Amino acid sequence: MIENLEKINLDETPLTRQLLENYVLRMYEDEADLSDESLKTELILLKNSNELQQLVLAEALTNLKM
C-alpha cells in the first residue's frame, strides 16, 4: 500500500491532503507549492526519509496557533 504513493489520488484522501498542506505551508511558508504533484513528492520524500510523523507534528503545531 505505502509503496504506491506515486499513484495516490489526493482528492480521494482529503485528510492526507490536509496534513500535507499544513506541513508544506509550515515548512515553506511563502514558497509553498500546494499542487498535487508537489504534495505527492513531499509525501514520498517524508516516507523515504522515515519522517512521516512530521505530518502529525505539523498538524499539532497548526492547531496550537488557533
Image (tube, rainbow, N blue to C red):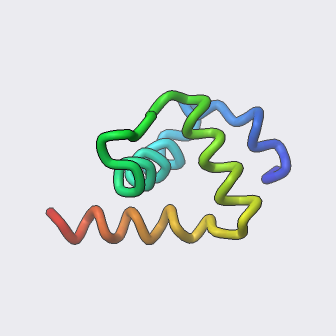
> Residue farthest to the front?
31
Task: Say whether residue 61 is left or right of residue 15.
Answer: left
Taking 55 as reference, is 35 above or below it? above
| Residue lying at 32% horizontally and 48% vertically, measured from the top left | 29
Residue 38 drawn at (x, y percent): 57, 35
Q: Is residue 64 above or below residue 27?
A: below
- The image quarter containing residue 11 is top right
Q: Residue at 72% of width from left, 65% of height from top?
A: 49
Residue beneath the point at 65% across and 41% down: 41
Residue at 35% of width from left, 70% of height from top? 60
Q: Residue furthest left?
A: 66
Residue 65 placement (x, y as % from top left)? 17, 66
13 relative to 57, above or below: above
Q: How many marks?
A: 0
Where 52 sits versus 36, above or below? below
The answer to whether 27 appears left or right of 8 in the picture is left
Towards the viewer: 49 or 12: 49
Instruction: Give the quadrant of the C terminus.
Output: bottom left
Residue 34 point in image, percent of width and height: 44, 34
Q: Is 48 positioned to the left or the right of 58 in the image?
A: right
Query: Looking at the image, which is closer to me, 28 or 52?
Result: 28
Locate residue 51, reporting x and y percent.
Answer: 63, 68
